[in-house]
Image: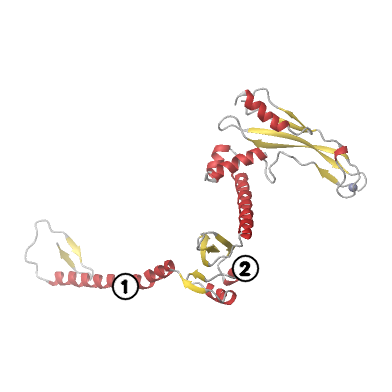
Amino acid sequence: MSSAQYIIQAKRFCQEPEYLVCLPEDPLDDTAVWVVTSQKSHADFLCPFCGHPMHIYESYQTRLKTIPVQPHGHRSVLFKGRRFRCPCCHETVTESNPYRCPGTRITKRAALWIKSLLAHGLTIHSVQEITGIHWDTIRRVHETVMDESLKTYAVMLEQNHYKPRFLAVDEFAIHKGHTYATTVMDLESGFVIWVGKGRSLADFQKFFEEISPELLSDVKAVAMDMNASYNTLVSRYLPQAKIVYDRYHMQAQYGRDVLGVVRLEEARKHKAAADELKCKQTAAPIRKQPRHSVKRKCRNGSSTAS
Ligand SMILES: [Zn+2]
């Protein structure tokens, strides 16, 4: 990092006059801690419960991970804040840390860095390798990204008066043999509309309880697995929609119930014919003995030579 960049970064930290920022002398030294001390006094706080002026009760410190300068470096920011107490109602208030990404021990800048890496399609594990930040923290940031995207997407759909026409419902395994989930997607846009835990009828019923009937008023057809009992609920809640058993599940079931049975039957026939042939060869007179004969046993127990 050049000294000009360092000054710019430092100014960003110092842009709020209520905080005193002490930067390390060497801008390339990731081991040195940036110390941010709150300059707020009791005059800045009024009790949120009774409106009375508060006084400083105690101090606290929070260490946050932030973006390092060197590759694989670890840089941290130490925030020194205060707790205030109301002399009237005796309630305490902790000063919020303006640099902290909510729910984590990293700065907002580090969270933005993680978001930019995730936006390039990197996995959580890859981001962990690059940033040195804990996997669980990156997962939390990822969750906030997904929540924000879903909210934006919901607003966009509402503005465009979105109403799906062709739906598909299916189950998928979260932990194979243990936990399953049911998902509903729009076949035209390819977007997942709803995901719920479990695969029973009661679990699928939540879809109709959580999604407004107005949104589903234009549904013309619902594709599903012919083995599942989703059709019962679709017929009840969407009487105007046609039920379509999708090709994938029909092919899968045809392969299992028809082709599988025929294949086994044919295999049994061939095996029986082979056994019969071996027995005939055993019963036939041996005219010529090969020089190095090897004894082998027939399936019916009699020994023969080859
Ligand atoms: Zn109070």
Q: Quadrant of residue 184?
A: bottom right
Q: Is residue 280 above or below residue 67?
A: below
Q: CA distance from mark 2 to mark 1?
A: 41 Å
Give whichever of 284, 36 is nearer the camera. Answer: 36
Looking at the rendered image, the quarter that the C terminus falls into is bottom left
Visible in this render: residue 106?
A: no
Visible in this render: residue 291?
A: yes
- Which numbered disc flags the more N-terminal residue, 2 or 1? 2
Please tell me which residue is depicted at 63% across the width and 38% down the height of the picture.
110
Please tell me which residue is depicted at 17% across the width and 61% down the height of the picture.
295
Q: Amino acid under label 1?
A: Val
| Side of 228 where 262 appears, left or right | left
What residue sits right under mark 2 in the picture? 206
Mark 2, ligand 1, within 8 Å: the answer is no
Mark 1: give few (<14), some (14-19) or many (20+) Cα within 10 Å. few
Where in the figure is residue 80, as x and y percent of width and height?
A: 76, 34
Q: Quadrant of residue 19?
A: top right
Looking at the rendered image, the quarter that the N terminus falls into is top right
| Side of 65 where 120 appears, left or right | left
Q: Amino acid under label 2?
A: Lys
Please tell me which residue is depicted at 8% across the width and 61% down the height of the picture.
289
What residue sits right under mark 1 in the picture? 262
Which secondary structure lies at badge 2?
A: helix
Q: How is the image coloured?
A: secondary structure
Please tell me which residue is depicted at 65% across the width and 23% down the height of the picture.
26
Between circles 2 and 1, the one closer to the viewer is 2
Where in the figure is residue 198, as x and y percent of width and height?
A: 57, 65
Mark 2: give few (<14), some (14-19) or many (20+) Cα within 10 Å. some
Give whichever of 27, 90 is nearer the camera. Answer: 27
